[in-house]
Image (cartoon, rainbow, N blue to C red):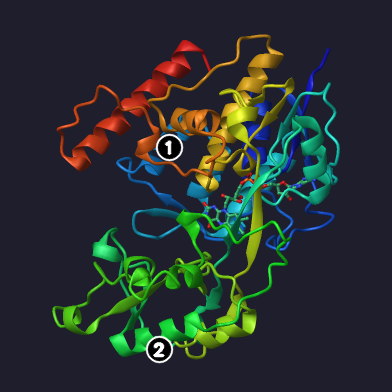
């Protein structure tokens, strides 16, 4: 009998999972709600939408997220193919034209004969059907209830924000300059807005005193933010110098020796589309009211008359209690037909969400082929992420990005230099993924 897998959500994890299953000759019903109603951060109907930053971060294998990409390429990741096809210059980062990226994914999915796209808001999960839930951090309330019914527990949450995008031709190019931090990369990809101490302090004080948008928190809720993607105003509230060690740090951006004395802070802008007419403010995710964003961010030199094509917004992200609910095959412990993938599992980030889609799909394929389910080696970044979300203490469970501390590096020479050590971790992770693929004939 032909087995069909239901996938809920055609975001990064869901699209990747659908592609991986179809590659293995498995039929998929892919449910997606955005064609009927979009959530507040969605702006297009195409699949695999990047809702905030347009970068999939570092490509350097010494960085765990760089190695994660190499691992995912071994599984022929659709999302990475889309990213490299829509790549924009951005030093050592994999930045993309978000529209071209999403269109590539949409096209691959909609033209795949084994994938049946269903435009629908899913509510209840049928426990008898094989399903991957990849509905993301902004899972609709109706499906949140459906998930609660099947997992029998509440969600965790945190707040996450989006950074604004401005038009290049509205910027004062006499005040900005092109440079990548430490001159990484062959071209100069980032626009930099330099600030003197006086300019910084004025901006900082206005930011502190700005009006924030009301998040309509329930009584029992507090404004929990994710440390790795903190709103710029929350970061500022931690002290006058915090931004200078974060998104406004000037190091590696000096134009000349004199700059060392005058340059106090630098705001970076990154190309957001292939036409090179839109730029996002790097690290400026925010919950300021829109009028306040215009007022305060226009204090940045060069942005006095900036035209904002998108303002920052903040949203509540939901994730399940994976340490108690999931096993390392991304399967629900209490129902072997149900798998989870993406940010809803507590992995954090575009690349990490996609990676979990690969893991869930390969295990679903094995279930259908009546093979044993498999766990990725903990010495790989993919395995480290799954190990973290499934085994960390459930009380302190917080979303996790790729980093070397979650990868098992026991037995590796601890006396090595930091950089060399990371290169060794990377070599081992990639070798172990290759062996894993051979062992299980994936
Ligand atoms: C505001 C915000 C900003 C973020 N910024 C970044 C960033 O800059 N960099 C980064 O690396 N990560 C960022 N993230 C985190 C995360 O990487 C992204 O959310 C990523 O898109 C997660 O991938 P996903 O596949 O899990 O979910 P998504 O890409 O969100 O896909 C889930 C899909 O499920 C659909 N869906 C939801 N409910 C239903 C339903 N009931 N029925 C059918 N379909 C449904 C949605 O419409 C959506 O298309 C951000 C998250 C948020 C919320």
| Residue 248 picture location, percent across and down | 36, 72
Image-based side of 396 in relation to 103, left or right:
left
The quadrant where residue 1 appears:
top right
* Label 2: which secondary element: helix
Which residue is at a point 22% across and 35% down the rendered structure image?
A: 421
Residue labelled with disc 1: 68
Q: Tell me if residue 364 comes above or below residue 11 in the rendering.
A: above
Residue 436 or 124: which is nearer the viewer? 124
Q: Tell me if residue 385 comes above or below residue 284 in the rendering.
A: above
Image-based side of 423 in relation to 325, left or right:
left
| Residue 22 picture location, percent across and down | 68, 28
Residue 440 or 126: which is nearer the viewer? 126
Q: Around disc 1, counting alpha carbons within 10 Å, would you say few (fewer than 14), some (14 to 19), or many (20 or more)?
A: many
Residue 302 in view: no
Residue labelled with disc 2: 202
* Label 1: which secondary element: helix
Residue pushed farthest front?
220
The quadrant where residue 30 appears:
top right
Mark 1 to mark 2 CA distance (whole Å): 41 Å
Residue 210 or 310: which is nearer the viewer? 210
Question: Which numbered mark, 1 or 2, is in the foreground of this view?
Answer: 2
Residue 150 in view: yes
Which residue is at a point 41% across and 43% down the rendered structure image?
A: 65
| Residue 185 picture location, percent across and down | 29, 58
Question: Are the residues tagged 1 and 2 within 8 Å (C-beta)?
Answer: no
Which residue is at a point 35% across and 88% down the rendered structure image?
A: 199
| Residue 210 picture location, percent across and down | 55, 83
Label of residue 416 in the image: none
Q: Around disc 2, counting alpha carbons within 10 Å, would you say few (fewer than 14), some (14 to 19), or many (20 or more)?
A: few
Upstream in sequence: badge 1 or badge 2: 1
Q: Tell me if residue 163 comes above or below residue 147 in the rendering.
A: below
């Amino acid at each position: 009998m032909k087995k069909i897998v239901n996938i809920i959500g055609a975001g990064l994890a869901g699209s990747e999972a659908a592609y991986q299953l179809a590659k293995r000759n498995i039929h998929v019903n892919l449910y997606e709600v955005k064609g009927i109603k979009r959530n507040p951060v969605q702006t297009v109907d195409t699949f695999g939408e990047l809702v905030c930053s347009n970068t999939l971060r570092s490509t350097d294998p010494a960085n765990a997220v760089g190695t994660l990409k190499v691992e995912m390429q071994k599984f022929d990741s659709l999302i990475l193919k889309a990213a490299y096809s829509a790549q924009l210059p951005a030093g050592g980062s994999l930045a993309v034209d978000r529209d071209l990226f999403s269109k590539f994914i949409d096209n691959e999915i909609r033209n795949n004969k084994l994938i049946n796209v269903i435009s629908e808001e899913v509510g209840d999960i049928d426990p008898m059907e094989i399903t991957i839930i990849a509905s993301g951090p902004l899972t609709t309330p109706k499906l949140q209830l459906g998930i609660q019914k099947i997992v029998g527990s509440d969600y965790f949450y945190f707040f996450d924000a989006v950074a604004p995008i401005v038009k290049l031709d509205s910027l004062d190019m006499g005040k900005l300059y092109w440079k990548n931090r430490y001159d990484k990369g062959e071209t100069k990809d980032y626009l930099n807005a330099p600030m003197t101490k006086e300019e910084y302090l004025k901006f900082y004080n206005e930011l502190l005193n700005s009006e924030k948008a009301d998040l309509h928190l329930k009584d029992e809720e507090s404004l929990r933010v994710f440390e790795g993607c903190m709103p710029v105003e929350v970061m500022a509230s931690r002290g006058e110098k915090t931004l200078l060690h974060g998104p406004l740090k000037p190091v590696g951006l000096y134009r000349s020796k004199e700059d060392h004395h005058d340059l106090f802070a630098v705001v970076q802008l990154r190309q957001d589309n292939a036409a090179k007419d839109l730029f996002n403010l790097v690290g400026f995710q925010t919950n300021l009211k829109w009028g306040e964003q215009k007022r305060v961010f226009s204090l940045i030199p060069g942005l006095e008359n900036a035209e904002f094509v998108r303002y920052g917004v903040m949203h509540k992200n939901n994730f399940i209690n994976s340490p108690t609910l999931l096993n390392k095959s991304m399967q629900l412990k209490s129902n072997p037909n149900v798998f989870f993938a993406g940010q809803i599992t507590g992995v954090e980030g575009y690349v990490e969400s996609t990676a979990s889609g690969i893991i869930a799909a390969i295990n679903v394929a094995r279930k259908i082929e009546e093979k044993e389910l498999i766990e990725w080696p903990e010495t790989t970044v993919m395995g480290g992420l799954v190990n973290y979300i499934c085994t960390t203490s459930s009380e302190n469970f917080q979303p996790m990005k790729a980093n070397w501390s979650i990868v098992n590096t026991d037995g590796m020479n601890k006396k090595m230099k930091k950089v060399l050590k990371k290169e060794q971790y990377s070599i081992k992770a990639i070798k172990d993924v290759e062996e894993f693929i051979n062992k299980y004939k994936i």
